[in-house]
Amino acid sequence: MEFLDCNLVYGPDTMKGQLPGCPDIGALRAELDRAGVAGGLVYYAMEEPILGNEIIARDVANVRGARGMGGIRGERDARGAPELYGCWSLLPSSTGEITPPGELPKAMKKSNIAALALNPQANRYMPRASVIGDYLEMAQERSIPVLLNTGRGLTLEQAEALMSEFRNLTAILTYANCWPSDRQFRPFLDSYPNLYLDMSYIQTASWLPDITQRYGAGRVLFGSAFPECYIGAHMMVVRHAELSDDDKALIAGGNLKKLLKGARI
């Protein structure tokens, strides 16, 4: 079973009391290799988003080389290192600080960036359609995953407001509240067909077989929220869940691989 993690973080802002912390991409790769994780989506934790976007583009390019997004396989590269795909932070296009929406897919392909992320509180903008809707419209048209993580300054209400404006947006919901959470995230799965659930913070007993029975194994993504949480915890949940081997394989990495291949970048 191949594991691909949809919620990995590294950078200086992971060193604020978290154990063990993950200051650079080398440390992240070492932890993934130790845990037996083949790779995943990685976000750079830094309050300055423009520099953070530059750093992660440099780091993932150094890891994988310039093979482009057409080479996404979700397996270890020729050197045996975990495959990592970057996430860029969005900012309002009206400030002209990042690449405009129409040019962004080309820039993402060049830099091996596979997804877009929102961190509105740290980056000081309102997460509304009138502010970042041009980027979300582009992402919706191209099936580019957008990370909606309530642990990064986005409330669940704000996430729902954005999804209601862009109902076919391919998005990954991370609800950073371990329990109880079913009454919070299940309505998202009911309402938005292209929304996927990151399992990083979910701790309800026997939740995975129940969610899979209701929504299918294709709606859940393995995620660890490393280094805030331990990588192996949810690996064990997937391995020992009362599910078929095929369903486990989808949740462990197959679903994320499909999302990355489906993005038109």
Image: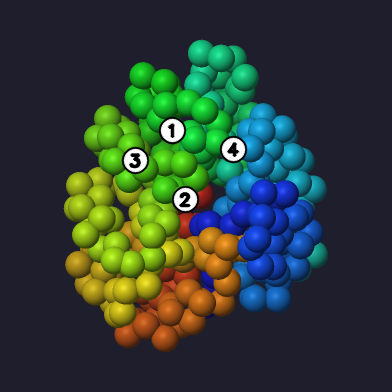
Q: Nearer the viewer, mark 3 or mark 4?
A: 3
Image position of 122 with respect to 232: above or below: above
**Label 3: few (<14), some or many (≥20) within 10 Å?**
many
Give whichever of 129, 240 is nearer the camera: 129
Mark closest to the chain's N terminus, 3 or 4? 4
Q: Secondary structure at mark 1?
A: helix
Q: What's under tag 4, amino acid-wise? A: Trp
Could you give the CA–CA distance between mark 1 and mark 4, rounded to whole angstroms?
A: 12 Å
* Residue closest to the eye, 199 or 82: 199
Residue count near mark 2 (Cα–Cα under 10 Å), binned few <14, some 14–19, many ≥20: some
Residue 119, horizontal then vertical, whole percent: 51, 38
Residue 20, image quadrant: bottom right
Give the secondary structure at mark 4: strand
Looking at the rendered structure, the kind of residue marked 3 is Ala
Out of 234 and 204, give the one closest to the viewer. Answer: 204
Percent of width and height locating residue 70: 59, 45
- What's the residue at 65%, 76% (across, down)? 35
Q: Which mark is residue 88?
A: 4
> Which is closer to the viewer, label 2 or label 1?
2
Instruction: Please tell me the numbered disc located at residue 92.
Output: none
Residue 139 image label:
1
**Looking at the image, is mark 4 or mark 2 earlier in the sequence?**
4
Drawn side of residue 9 relative to residue 174, left or right: right
Disc 2 marks a residue whose amino acid type is Gly
Q: Quadrant of residue 83?
A: bottom right
User: Which label number is shown at residue 159?
Assistant: 3
Q: How far separated are the C-alphas under marks 1 and 3?
A: 15 Å
Q: Mark 2 sits on what residue?
A: 151
